[in-house]
Amino acid sequence: GENVEQHPSTLSVQEGDSAVIKCTYSDSASNYFPWYKQELGKRPQLIIDIRSNVGEKKDQRIAVTLNKTAKHFSLHITETQPEDSAVYFCAASRRNSGYSTLTFGKGTMLLVSP
Amino acid sequence: SQTIHQWPATLVQPVGSPLSLECTVEGTSNPNLYWYRQAAGRGLQLLFYSVGIGQISSEVPQNLSASRPQDRQFILSSKKLLLSDSGFYLCAWSGSSNEQYFGPGTRLTVT
């Protein structure tokens, strides 16, 4: 089955700096890669995703890149703010007949200091 | 728009007691439904998923079970809880695309 590795497990940055979280996956058939943000005690929220037919996607201060050959994808957050502090999860999936299951990384705790 | 509900929000149960958690989705039909568990400070573990009424697939062996009696209702159950069943239980849904959206979760403490 799919295996997703996520690094680092903890990332501390100063407000205004950039943050990068990296994930690798094992199943070459995976074609969908979402990122979730989970604040303490809350549900994970989908913040950005990328499909295998594109290499990069951007939404304001966040961007995701995908390298299918190397089987890795990354989340980039620019101009970090204290409210970006949360646990971030990457995931990978492939679409089966009518459904897909996500395999999650173990998460990265991002701490943004004012 | 679609909305996903879970209840109860929190639950404290003794070891050996039964469990029933409910999840319902509004604003969509024929959703794919998922149950995840998140242990304290850990990642998300897929427990069950369902592509239709009465269709349940289990990802890991355990003393939990799931049922889908209606199109937009997903229930997680146990006959006898273990201490290791404590955690944050999240229901999620997806439609025709891959995006999964999570419910607010149920925090279960087994004492």
Image: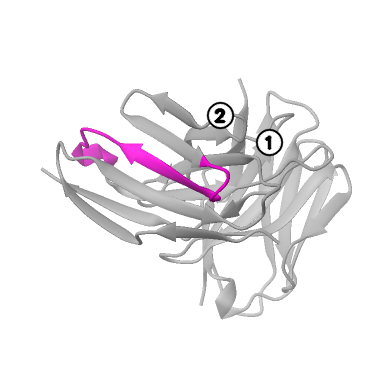
Tag 1: residue type? Ser
The x, y position of residue B29, in whole percent, is: 78, 27
Marks 1 & 2, CB-CB < 8 Å contact: no
The x, y position of residue A93, in whole percent, is: 65, 46
Which residue is denoted by mark 1 in the rendering? B94
Q: Quadrant of residue B69?
A: top right
Task: Report helix, strand or loop for mark 1.
Answer: strand
Q: Quadrant of the image for the N terminus of chain B?
A: top right
| Magenta extent | A67-84
In this rendering, would A15 be left or right of B55? left
Tag 2: residue type? Val
In this rendering, would B67 be left or right of A77? right
Chain bearing mark 2:
A
Residue at x 66% of width, y 79% of height: B16
The residue lying furthest to the left in this view is A114
In this rendering, would A29 be left or right of B44? right
